[in-house]
Structures are given as structure tokens and as C-alpha cells.
Amino acid sequence: MSLLKVAVQKSGRLSEDSLKLFNECGIKFNNGAKKLKAQSHNFPIEFLFLRDDDIPGYVEDGIADIGIVGQNVHEEYGKDIEVVKYLGFSKCRLSLAIPREDSYTDVTYFEGKNLATSYPVILKKFLDEKGVKADVHEISGSVEIAPGIGLAEGICDIVSSGSTLLSNGLKEVETVMKSEAVMVASKSLSTDKKNILNQLIFRINAVLEGKNKKYVLLNAPNDSIDKIIDLLPGMRSPTVLPLAEKGWSSIHSVISEDDFWENIEKLREAGAEGVLVVPIEKMIK
Ligand code: PRT
Ligand code: ZN
């Protein structure tokens, strides 16, 4: 029986959410001592805990079969591996930033400038596409301090809330790429391993589908049922059950969180009351 070897970040911004995802997929393992490896006892998976920068290369070389990394790392290393699932966490962007006091019009600002980044491949590709020639210097950490110490005139770095740029006197002027965590896989998996990966992706889909959806239960007078059903299309069609009180029904449906907030006023106007919104743990279409 094959084991699918999964590379996840040992410690960092991706670690907790990556392990949480496997946990929500019902895949149990013991990672107590933060070892290099751990095997699940209820799913044919073995975890390898690595630095995120090493994951694309290890997946390409077959040391790991699949891995979880930021799209930024996947693009930068450009390994011959494929993205098999967008995971929706660790969202951020790779942006160009310049000193706050400088005025900015467009990307031609960067012509002939010195730029510091940990993502030279992605940045050079972006500048090439825009027809801008700049000097790109690779530095491995604390990119945001480069302009302050005279090392560069601008930077290209990961931005999430923007507070790191702000506290270093910088402003974000161009988004180079948007990123989220992705599952990457080797292009040469055996049939056995592909089957395990498909089972894993089936479970991940069920978890991700459930995340944005809510189970809604509400009471309504029978003559409002049609109007309410129009507002709650549900998976196939909503469930309608009679209440003990004559002339009233309980309506159950599944709705996305955004649609729920958009429709709540209309539901109330249509006669809905006693509305309950319940989280969904897994959803299989
Ligand atoms: O040790 P190892 O090499 O494994 O980890 P690492 O230090 O290289 O990576 P880590 O754990 O910092 O980030 C892993 C991945 O998380 C990145 O490749 C991104 O895909 C994603 N991610 C999401 C982020 C951020 N948000 C983020 N805010 N990566 C880094 N940052 C840093 C950024 O470099 C900057 O210093 O946070 C600062 C900006 O944050 P704000 O909120 O101030 O804008
Ligand atoms: Zn790293």
C-alpha cells in the first residue's frame, strides 16, 4: 500500500492552517514533538515538515509527492510541478513600494531604479512585461528596511495588512501578484498515489465548500413560503416542514454567507421569523 508524502511548512505562517485543513479532513496524526516526519494512522499519508522554500524542489525531485506553499514561492522557484488545489488561506499580495514622500504616477517611475526583493524572478518578469528596466537586487530578509538604509530606492515584498510598509515610511504603489496557499503536486505520481490525492482533494473540497455556506432555518406563515423559497434557492430546493402551529412552516436551506446578509431584510419583509444560521462543517455536492 502506497503512502502519499505531503510536505508542509515546519513552522511559519502556513503551518497552522495547513495542519488544520488535514484535521478538518478527518486525517489524524501525532505531531507532538514537532518531528521531521509524521504518519497518519487513519489515512495513507506521511507528513514531511520542511522550510517552505524547499518544498517546490522536493516535490519536483519526488522526495515529497505533494506540498502546500504560497503561490508566490511556487512562482518564484518555477519548478516543473502543478497546482492541484487553491486553498484559500494565507492570502497576501506581492507589491512594489516606495518612500511615502515620493510622488508616484505610474510604473515608469521604476525605470533605472534600484529595487530590493526576495522575489527577483517574479519582479523581473513583471518589469519586463511593463517594459521597465530597473536594477533588481535579491536580499533574503527584512526587505522593508532597504530604502531606509540606502540599499534600494524601492522594494517588492509581501504585503498583508500593510502595517510593515507603513511603519517603515513606505507606500504600496503596484500589485505585482496576488497569492494564497496552494497544493502543488509532482507530475509523475503513480496511479496509487493519484488515487490517494483524489480522495484527499474530495475531502478538501467538502471542507472548503462548507466554509462559505450556512444552514438556515426559519419559520414563516404558509402564504409566504413561495416568496421565501425564491430568496433561498438551496442545494436542490429548500425543505419545508409544518410547524405544530397551524398555518406556519419551518423552512430549511443552504445559502452562502454573503447571500444571507444580502437577503436577510427581504426574508424578514416576506414574513420570516425565528431565523437560525448554523455553520456547516462539510458539504458534498
Ligand atoms: O521558515 P520558512 O522559510 O519556512 O518561512 P518564511 O519565513 O519564508 O515564510 P513565512 O512563514 O513568513 O510565510 C509563508 C507564506 O505565507 C509566504 O510565502 C506567503 O505566501 C504567506 N504570507 C501571508 C505572508 C504574509 N501573509 C506576510 N504578511 N508572508 C510574509 N508576510 C510578511 C512580509 O514578508 C512582511 O514582512 O509579513 C510582513 C507584511 O505583513 P503586513 O501585515 O505588515 O503587511
Ligand atoms: Zn521561506
Image (spheres, rainbow, N blue to C red):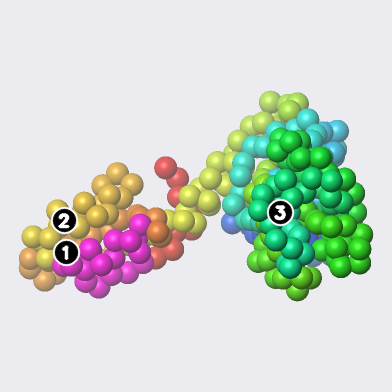
Q: Nearer the viewer, residue 192 or 284?
A: 284
Label 1 or label 3, whichever comes before in sequence order: 3
Amino acid identity at mark 3 = Ser
Q: CA distance from mark 3 to mark 2?
A: 47 Å
Q: What kind of element bears circle 1?
A: loop
Amino acid identity at mark 2 = Lys
199 in the magenta segment: no
The image's mark for residue 270 is: 1
* Residue 191 position in % (x across, y down): 69, 26
Residue at mark 3: 95
Q: What kind of element bears circle 2?
A: helix
Residue at mark 2: 227
The residues colored magenta run 259-277
Residue at (16% x, 56% y) in the render: 227
Local packing at callout 2 (Cα closer than 10 Å; few below 14, some 14-19, many 20+) is some
* Residue 115 position in % (x across, y down): 84, 52
Q: Nearer the viewer, residue 236 or 52?
A: 52
- The reply to whether callout 1 and callout 3 are in contact (CB within 8 Å) is no
Label 2 or label 1, whichever comes before in sequence order: 2
Q: Is residue 187 left or right of residue 85?
A: right
The image's mark for residue 143 is: none
